[in-house]
Amino acid sequence: MEEDKAIQPVDNWKAKVLVLGGVVGALTGLGAAYLLVQRAEKHGTPPNLSAGEGVKLGLLVFGLLRQVMSLGNGD
């Protein structure tokens, strides 16, 4: 009878990781947008990114994702 009352581990870690990743990503995006707006206000122009800045930003994001994927691999 005691075995029936044992706490079973909940296997919803995937959902928790996805939600946490979504929240962190949204907060990071809001922070980046805020910094872009602040820079635009400082210069008195509407925010714009050049093609070169977009490529640099994209490469930085891919590098970050690669680092996140390598976490826990022991490499």
Image (spheres, rainbow, N blue to C red):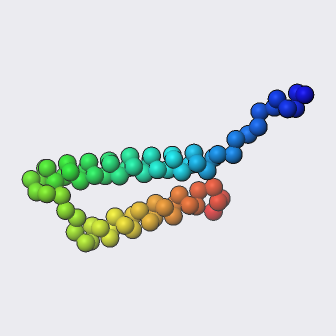
Count of marks overlaid on the render: 0
Between 33 and 43, which is closer to the camera in this rendering?
33
Q: Quadrant of residue 62?
A: bottom left
Q: Is residue 72 left or right of residue 24?
A: right
Q: Give the x, y percent position of residue 16.
A: 57, 45
Which residue: 39% across, 64% down? 60
Which residue: 61% across, 50% down? 14
Q: Is residue 9 above or below residue 33?
A: above
Residue furthest right as drawn: 1
Which residue: 32% across, 47% down? 31
Q: Is residue 54 left or right of residue 75?
A: left
Q: Is residue 75 left or right of residue 33?
A: right
Q: Give the x, y percent position of residue 72.
A: 63, 55
Quadrant assignment for the C terminus: bottom right
Q: Give the x, y percent position of residue 13.
A: 63, 46
Q: Is residue 39 above or below residue 56?
A: above
